[in-house]
Amino acid sequence: MNGQDLFKSMMVLGIFDSKEDSKTTIKKLLEQLWEYQEAEANLMVEIATMQYEDGDTKNAIGFLEKSVEIYHELGFTEQEAVILDLIGDVYFNMDDTQRAYDHYQHSFKLCSKIDTPLKEEVLNKIKELEDEIEALKEKVEEDAADASLKTESQKSGYPESVDEEKIDYEELGRRLDDIIGFLDESAVYGTYQKYKNPMGRLKEAYEMAVNIGDEKGEAALLLIMGDVSLKAEKTKNSLELFTKSLNLFRKVGNEKGEAISRLMIGTTYFLLGNTDEGSVYLRHSMEIIKSLKDKDIEKAALALLNSIYG
Amino acid sequence: MIVRIASGISGFDELTSSEDNLALKLGGFPENSATLIYGPPEVGKSTFCYQFTYQGLTQDEPCLYLTTDHGIQDIYDTMKGIGLNLDDYLENEMLYVVDAVSSDMEVEESDIYQRSSVHNPTDMLVKVSRVARSISQKSPRLRGVVDSVTTILESNNEMLIVRVLKTYILRIKEAGGTVIITYIEGSADSRTETLIKSMVDNIIKLDGEKIIIEAMKGMGRKEDAYRTTDEGIVILHDEQ
Amino acid sequence: MSTVESGIPGLDELLQSEAGYDLGGIPQNTSTLVYGPPKVGKSIFSYQFANHGLNLEEPCLYITADEGMKQLQQNMIDFGWYLQNAMEKELLYVIDSISSLSGAPIETTNTYTPSKINDPTDLMVKVGIGTRFVFKKSNEFRSVFDSLTTPFAFNPEPMVIRFLKTYIRRLQEAGSTLVITYTEGVADENTEKILKSVVDNVIMLDGSYLTFRSSEGLMGTAEYQITNQGLVLGEGEIL
């Protein structure tokens, strides 16, 4: 609506009858608009808080980021800085040091423009992280050196293998299928793999599970999608899917699912050449499996470990 | 004016037509609506579904049947027993079944017969949605049956199944469907029951002796006596 | 106190009492919760309320959470209420938070926007946009939320309450008269108490009687029926 139309409709509404001029009225409307926007941002923060308490970190961060955008638009620098610091805390608790650092930095820049006690707090957090990041950088360089050594001994066409001995991928694939078979839902979702476009069907079911809030189904589907990805050698993608699955199984307290997804993650790390990380997951998984006191799963898990370690 | 479709249950269309259009025989289920058929166990709810399905098939309306208690073989046999022969309709692919019961591998899966499990609500919903979508591309009308939602509620978090049912009803209606859903009274928490009743358009109770139409579009409350015979359910509607 | 014509025959007359109140309809700029068991006519109430306002050229912000837009239009047509005219004049703004679940393709227009039933934040944003649009047409407009039932199935109860509080506050600030429907028994007792306390007026439908209770303490009750022209009240009394 352009200025003229707005003016006309305001005349019709009798706004001018009170002898105020159009500038004042537009100002009032704008103020109302900004109030609504501020309330929106506040609501987002509230919702994010609840989601974080529920363990839904991803969405919590999403809403916090959205609220930062709104505060930025409104020019509420202090609020913006507060929420950026909050996001930094969330990432810090997730052990995502880099992202935590970036958000603290951003918050600090804003704090420097205004006079707030938050400035010192954020500065301290940044200093702590800087030490950690230095240490991380060194480790990354070490790992890279290790990996390049390993690539030299690797045969072409396959994802990097761990040992000098070749892993039997067919055997490994069968062991993985056995393990996934222990998941209650896999019987049904596993049959999707016989269709022409299994990933398409799995994604369709996954979206449905998300829409109706079927977390058990969601977790199982993520696991199976991860397995399909792994077989298609999309190793990094499968890692993401397995990790999402693990988080969901943990959220709903499904120990069997947790153990199975840890096995999958561990196996994938091995295939990526990261033995240390892989071992951690495999070990943790075996601990859970032992506590489940299920002989069949234990047997299958050991068979899987055998085909990895040789 | 509310468009209605023939129910297939003797006496039902008469019961649900208003006095002025009795002669025009315009009773039946409101088209594109969802109806809850509830009551104690063994009062004829499944029989109601069989007759409803068969009526549609004879009118060239495909039917999507989600079954959770009786496998396809059972349904086929029972329907034959009351004179409803499915042979032709299975052959010309008008009846689509999602069987959440049978685990035996005797019947092969195909476009018209798929297996699922009541423990996998997402899978049931996905399969049913796909079928509904593909039917709607070929036919303007379809009938849907969920027999029964009680069994699905028993195996899952109730609120999840409420959401599943809501999604199912939305999707079937989107495909032009008219659907009936059976439920055993008292089999779920009262909140769940209230939610289910609020999500359907019509509510019918069968208590073994009387059929009570508690809510139906365009109609007030009505009731009548009924009997289960060897030709299915017969409503003893006396003309006034 | 100024009022808004409800559009329910008999209701406005019922609310015109001799006790010094002069409610010839629903008090303007208030929020009213219409609640009761399933299938008693709550949605019909909200269709009737919206439709009547549109006939009087009063714009309406309509949030539908139980049925999609197509179904809403069909339901209203069953009573002989057609929305075409109002939509052409852009008097009706619809936020459809349920159709995305039906798999139907959704086209956003100037006055029709989808949202997601399990995303109150997105819904709130759409409410903000819709409110600004309708407010430009008139600072005395109607708003309907039909109903809270499905949101309670898809979201934790506290989240629905938070949403509702903000929704009511915003719309009242913008000058709207609100009607919100809810199926009794869907949320827990405590939540229901909060629901009733967060609105100004409550209207209870139980299948036979309509009972109105305002925040000022005015109470009236009357028999009602669902006819093929919507809800109609019979004789009633102020209590």
Image: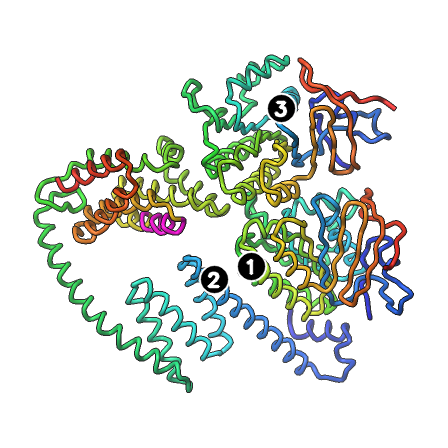
Tell me which residue sits at (69%, 33%) in the image: B31
**Mark 3, secondary structure of its residue:** loop
Return the mark for residue C158.
1
Name the residue that disc number 2 marks.
Answer: A50
Alpha-carbon neighbours of circle 2 within 10 Å: few (<14), some, or many (≥20)?
Answer: some
Tell me which residue sits at (46%, 74%) in the image: A72
In the image, A156 versus B173, the foreground residue is B173
Q: Amino acid at mark 3?
A: Glu
Mark 1 and mark 2 in contact? Answer it, CB < 8 Å: yes
Question: Are discs 3 and 2 located on one and the same chain?
Answer: no
Magenta highlight on residue B201 = no
User: In the rendered view of the protein, which quadrant contains the N terminus of chain A?
Assistant: bottom right
Name the residue that disc number 3 marks.
Answer: B42
| Image depth: mark 3 or mark 2 in front | 3
**Mark 1, secondary structure of its residue:** helix
Chain under disc 2: A
Highlighted magenta segment, given as a residue range: A242-252
| Image depth: mark 3 or mark 1 in front | 3
